[in-house]
Image (cartoon, helix red, strand yellow):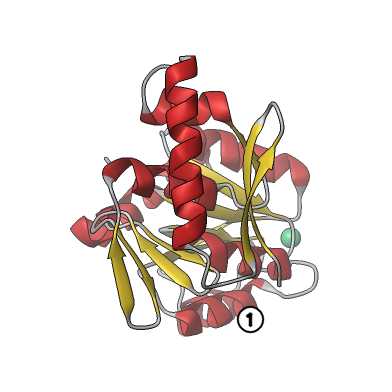
Amino acid sequence: MAKRRILIVEDEAMLRRIVRDAVESAGHYVTTAEDGEEALRLFRAEQPHLVIADIMLPKLDGFEMVRAMREEGGNTQYLFLSARSTAEDVVEGFRVGGNDYLRKPFAINELMARVEALLMRLGDDADSEIYTIGRYTLDTKAQTLTIDAETRHLSTKESAILATLAQNADSVVSSRSLLMEIWGDDSYYNLRSMNVFISKLRSYLSKDKSIDIRAIRGVGYKLVITK
Ligand code: CA
């Protein structure tokens, strides 16, 4: 199974960690949020393949959150994970756009079986990795970067570097991890080459002034989108 992006929204720290560990162990890329608003922001940035959502959450409850995510569109599956266990709650979960509903307490292997079943439904469409970067859209399958009606074709490395920065938006990505992931070695020669790629990406993204690929001296790069 391909590596998928999964967003876990759970305000209870212990449970968040347990679910995160299980999903990561299955080989997926995980981000977590502690409340509905943070989750909505991460959803927009990362376009996850699956959202595992608690219902009783601070700021924005799980039903409202999933409803808002559904309105944004995209190819995402939703799994509710909640202590709210009446038939009405379950019905409401499906009504707002949930694909599955698991009552707490639950067995972790049952959760993982449901996660994999939901990810199977995505089919090949999910192999297209779409990232929203400010006003730009990066499609790593087509290797295109689009703004308004203008589409630029990227090289494999350009696309991979930008996708990695976008996955980790607002966090520093070390030069070393970028080099190891994309070039397969972190020689000084490749570091110089990567810096050239970063300069090119900056110029490609220059139509949206809110986007900045910041160099963090001696460490790496950070993609920042100012709101
Ligand atoms: Ca909760």
Q: Is residue 37 above or below residue 180?
A: below
Q: Position of residue 89 (x, y in %)?
A: 59, 77
Query: Badge 1: how crowded within 10 Å, few (<14), some, or many (20+)?
Result: some
Q: Residue at x 67, y 38 (%)?
A: 17
- The N terminus lies in which quarter of the figure? top left
Q: Residue at x 57, y 81 (%)?
A: 68
Regarding residue 114, the answer to whether it shows in the image is yes
Q: Amino acid at mark 1?
A: Glu
Horizontal side, residue 32 vs residue 121: left or right: right
Regarding residue 113, the answer to whether it shows in the image is no
Q: Is residue 112 above or below residue 62?
A: above
Q: Residue at x 44, y 50 (%)?
A: 200
Could you say which is closer to the camera, residue 226 or residue 17? 226
- The C terminus lies in which quarter of the figure? bottom right
Residue 34 sits in quarter:
bottom right
Q: Position of residue 143 (x, y in %)?
A: 27, 56
Q: Position of residue 25 (x, y in %)?
A: 47, 30
Q: Position of residue 50 (x, y in %)?
A: 44, 58
Q: Residue at x 57, y 33 (%)?
A: 21
- Which residue is tagged 1? 64
Could you say which is closer to the camera, residue 187 or residue 10? 187
Q: Is residue 94 above or below residue 159?
A: below
Horizontal side, residue 144 vs residue 134: left or right: left
Residue 10 sits in quarter:
bottom right
